[in-house]
Amino acid sequence: MKIYLDNAATTQVAEEVFNEMKPYFKEKYGNASSLHNYGQEAAKALENSRRIIADKLKAQTEEIIFTSGGTESNNLAILGVAYNFKNKGNHIITTKFEHPSVLETCKALEKEGFSITYLNLNKEGLVNLEELRNSIINKTILVSIMHANNEIGVIQDLKEIYKICKEKNISLHTDAVQSFCKTEVNSDMADLISISAHKIHGPKGIGALYIKKGVKIKKLFHGGKHEFNIRPGTENVAGAVGFAKASLLIKDEDIKRMTKLRNKLINNILKIGDTWLNGSRERLCNNVNISFKYIEGESIMMKLNEKGIAVSTGSACATKELKPSHVLLAIGLKPEDAHGSIRITLSKYTTEKEINYLIKELPSVIKELREMSPYKEEKNDV
Ligand SMILES: *Cc1c(COP(=O)(O)O)cnc(C)c1O
C-alpha cells in the first residue's frame, strides 16, 4: 500500500492539468512579451489563464498578478504595502499562527523599524474580533490574517474581519493558499489574497496575488514591466495554464466526499483513548489534526511511513527542526502535547479504502509506541 495523506504540504498534479500544460513546453514555448506569433500565442494562453483565475475570485483580470507561489505572494503583499505606506504608518497586525512566509516577513519588517502586533487565537483557533478592533491604531497600515490554517484547517470569519478593516480604512491581506478551491474565496473577502497552484493539484512554482483595484503596493523586483509593472520576469506560461486548469477541476461533490471521509477518520481516531482534535470541528474539508498523549508525532509519522502511509507532524517546514508547532502552541497546547500531534490531509483522489486502511493500522501503532513511552508510568492504563 502507498497512501499519500499529506495534501496540505503539496498535491499530485492532476492528469488534466499535466495534459493542458504539455504543449507550452514543446510547441507553444514563446515568450509572452514577443510580438511574433509564438509570443502572441503564449500571451493569449497567459491572459486566458488570468481570466479563469479572476473569474474564480470574482475579480477583474488587472487585479491578478502571477507569482512563483504562495510564499512570494505573501512577501509581495506584506512588503509591498509596508514599503508603499511607510510614511503613513509603521504598524501591521497579523496573528501568532500564520504560515512562516507571513510570520518571517513580519519579523524582517520589525528589524527595519516596523511594529507588529501578533493576535492571539482561542482554543478553537479563531481570532477575537474585539482584540483585532482594539489593536488598530492610527499608524496601522495593514492587517494580514490567513483564511484557512495549514496545520489545523480552521477557517477565519474574513467577512467580519474585513468589515472592521474597512470601517478603519485599513487594507486586509489574507493567505488563502489552503482554502482556495476548498471553500469560497473571493474579492469580497479582502484587498489582497495569496493563492498557490500546487495545493490544488496544479504545478509547483506558480501562484497569484489578487490586488484590489486602488490598493497601491511597491514593487519588490526590478527589470521589466510584466504583470502590470508589479512583478517583472518572463512569465511562467505553462504554470499559469496549469494553475487555471487546476482551479476548474474541484467540484462540490469532491468537497462533500472529502468532508465525509474526514469525519469518518476523525470519529474513528478519537476512539483511541487519550486523543483530541486540534482546532474547531468546523474546518477545511480535508484536514485532520489530532494529538495523542504520551507519544511523539514524529514516531507516529515514521511508523506509518513504514506501512506506506504518508502523514505529517505540523507543517513541512517545521518538521526538520523538531520544535513544537507554533500553531499548536498558539491555540494553547502545552509543548509536550503539541509534540504528540499528527496532521492528516486528504485530496479529492483519497479513497475510502485508503481511509479504512489507516483506521485499521493506527491503533496498533499508537499502542506499540505508548508501551515504549517514557511517560507511561504517569498514566494509569492505556
Ligand atoms: C503552502 C503554503 C504557503 C506557501 O505556498 P508556496 O506556493 O509553497 O510557496 C503559504 N501559505 C500557506 C497557508 C500554505 O499552506
Image (tube, grey):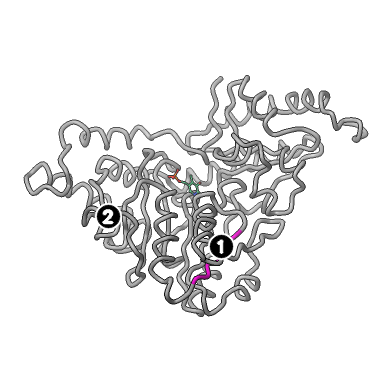
Residue 134 location, quadrant: bottom right
SS at mark 2? loop
Q: CA distance from mark 2 to mark 1?
A: 28 Å
Name the spot of residue 354 as percent of width and height, x first. Answer: 58, 28
Label 2 CB less than 8 angstroms from ligand 1: no
Name the spot of residue 246 as percent of width and height, x first. Answer: 36, 43
Residue range of the region highlighted in magenta in the rendering: 90-95
Name the spot of residue 270 as percent of width and height, x first. Answer: 74, 39
**Residue 331 higher or lower than 243, as above or below:** below
**Residue 4 higher or lower than 92, as above or below:** above
Label 1 CB less than 8 angstroms from ligand 1: no
**Which residue in the structure is indicated by mark 1?**
94
Which badge, 2 or 1, is on the more N-terminal residue?
1
- Please state which of the two labelled residues, at mark 2 or mark 1, is closer to the viewer: 2
Left or right: 189 as drawn, with respect to 64: right
The amino acid marked with disc number 1 is Thr
Residue in front for this viewpoint, 332 or 291:
332
**Residue 281 higher or lower than 81, as above or below:** above
Q: What secondary structure characterizes most of the magenta part?
A: strand
Q: How many marks?
A: 2
Residue 160 location, quadrant: bottom right
Left or right: 119 as drawn, with respect to 272: left
The amino acid marked with disc number 2 is His
Residue in front for this viewpoint, 6 or 119:
119
**Which residue in the structure is indicated by mark 2?**
222
Residue pictured at 53% horizontal, 49% vertical:
100
